[in-house]
Image (cartoon, helix red, strand yellow):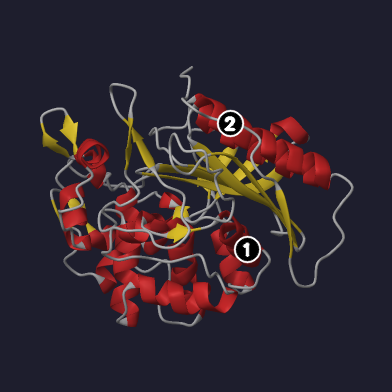
């Protein structure tokens, strides 16, 4: 376990009371303590700082530990912005499902119906892939970030170590890169997580509406819900205003500030910026039925098997059985992007949501800090559901 320099734990914990506040449940205090403990442990192991929010009904409690700027003495602000990475996918799938509800597409349509030549090489054929398969990661398409730019050096490696801020990518560039990875195989496919799927989903939104998915997400989700800390940059590498600085761990143990990074590389699969409070509000509204009609909510929550015995995957969202609290069912997702790692878990109806975000990225899901965020959010929701 790495030791962090100059980390203080247990930074400010604040209570934000929103309009129409409902009484906090008797287990709210223990849920807040669990989330704060996750933040503390995350800052003690992997991250300069961790921020988060717990939503219980319309009561929101903020937590934080450590620092936004590595080595500084200013505590991390729990209301600061950060990059949410793959949590962008749920915004994209929500817009696709809204378009279906409006009769503008069906998620059982093929990719080729809207993007005739986007997937048409190396054995891959968009006529054999549906939008539903994109959203559930069952298309069989490979991950473009796995493409080897040089022997043993993938695009993801290049992104992590070199930032690629000066490079430009169109969505079709990313898809074309994916199609170089391995030959396609015919027939149905098991679940395989790939950003390529959600790049194509964004391209379909653009083909159907005539607008970049960032515009549709802004108009359909961000503005109606009043998510003032949420945005979808399409080319600007910077974060503005009050934000949590993102860090890269270097081979020598030092850190580099990578708050500014290339958003074109992940677009509708991972480019968005938000806050813990906005993430909780979006998830609560979505699971509470405010953004999709019942038929599309059913599709959102129709899942496929994954390698995990407790997790199945819907359309940009994961169904999780919490074995640590009586096999209660919750919904969840996470986001990994250069400089940031974040998690959220929520009750079936969205009334209870726990969010934590750390300001350094380590790839997978098994470092001490990542496990601390996962455990903290899971335990917090468990206690709210007890």
Q: CA distance from mark 1 to mark 2?
A: 29 Å
Which residue, given by chain and number where applicable, does mark 1 sit on? 281
Question: At numbered mark 2, what does the secondary structure look like: helix, strand or loop?
Answer: loop
Task: Name the mark nearer the viewer: 1 or 2.
Answer: 2
Left or right of residue 96: residue 205: left
Q: What residue is at 46 percent from the left and 49 percent from the top?
A: 244
Q: Which x, y percent locates residue 167?
A: 15, 54
Q: Nearer the N terminus, badge 1 or badge 2?
A: 2
Secondary structure found at label 1? helix
Q: Nearer the viewer, residue 293 or 351?
A: 351
Q: Nearer the viewer, residue 63 or 132?
A: 63
Rendered image: mark on residue 8:
2
Q: Quadrant of residue 263?
A: bottom left
Q: Which mark is residue 337?
A: none
Label 2 neighbour load within 10 Å: few <14, some 14-19, many 20+? some
What is the count of numbered marks? 2
* Rendered image quadrant of residue 99: bottom left
Is 87 displayed left or right of 261 in the figure? right
Q: Position of residue 220 (x, y in %)?
A: 49, 77
Nearer to us in this view, 141 or 260: 260
Residue reaching furthest to the top? 1
Neighbour tally class for label 1: few under 14, some 14-19, many 20 plus, Cα within 10 Å: many
Give above or below for 44 relative to 113: above
The quarter of the picture where residue 149 lies is top left
Residue 71: x %, y % from top left: 44, 34
Height in image: 213 above or below 347? below
Q: Is residue 206 visible?
A: yes
Q: Residue at x 34, y 23 (%)?
A: 253
């Amino acid at each position: 376990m790495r030791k962090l320099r100059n980390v203080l734990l247990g930074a400010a914990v604040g209570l934000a009371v929103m309009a129409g506040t409902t009484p906090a449940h008797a287990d709210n205090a223990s849920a807040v303590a669990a989330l704060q403990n996750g933040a503390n442990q995350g800052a003690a192991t992997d991250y300069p700082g961790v921020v988060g929010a717990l939503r219980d009904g319309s009561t929101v409690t903020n937590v934080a530990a450590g620092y936004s700027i590595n080595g500084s003495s200013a505590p991390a602000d729990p209301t600061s912005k950060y990059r949410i990475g793959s949590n962008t996918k749920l915004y994209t799938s929500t817009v696709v499902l809204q378009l279906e509800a409006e009769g503008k597409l069906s998620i059982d349509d093929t990719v080729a119906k809207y993007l005739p030549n986007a997937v048409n090489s190396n054995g891959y054929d968009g006529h054999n892939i549906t939008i539903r398969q994109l959203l559930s990661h069952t298309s069989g398409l490979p991950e473009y970030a796995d493409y080897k730019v040089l022997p043993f050096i993938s695009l993801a490696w290049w992104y992590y170590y070199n930032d690629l801020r000066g490079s430009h990518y169109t969505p079709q560039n990313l898809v074309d890169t994916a199609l170089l990875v391995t030959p396609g195989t015919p027939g149905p496919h098991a679940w395989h997580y790939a950003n390529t799927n959600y790049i194509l989903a964004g391209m379909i939104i653009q083909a159907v509406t005539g607008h970049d998915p960032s515009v549709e997400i802004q108009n359909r989700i961000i503005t109606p819900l009043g998510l003032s800390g949420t945005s979808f940059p399409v080319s600007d590498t910077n974060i503005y205003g009050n934000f949590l600085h993102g860090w890269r761990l270097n081979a020598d143990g030092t850190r580099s500030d990578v708050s500014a990074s290339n958003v074109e590389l992940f677009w509708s699969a991972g480019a968005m910026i938000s806050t813990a409070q906005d993430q909780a509000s979006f998830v609560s509204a979505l699971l509470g039925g405010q953004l999709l009609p019942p038929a599309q909510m059913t599709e959102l929550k129709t899942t496929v098997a994954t390698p995990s015995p407790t997790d199945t995957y819907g359309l940009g969202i994961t169904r999780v059985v919490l074995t640590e609290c009586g096999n209660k069912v919750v919904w969840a997702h996470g986001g990994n992007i250069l400089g940031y790692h974040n998690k959220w878990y929520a009750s079936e109806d969205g009334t209870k949501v726990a969010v934590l975000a750390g300001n350094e990225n380590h790839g997978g899901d098994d470092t001490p800090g990542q496990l601390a965020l996962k455990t903290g959010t899971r335990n917090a929701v468990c206690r709210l559901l007890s």
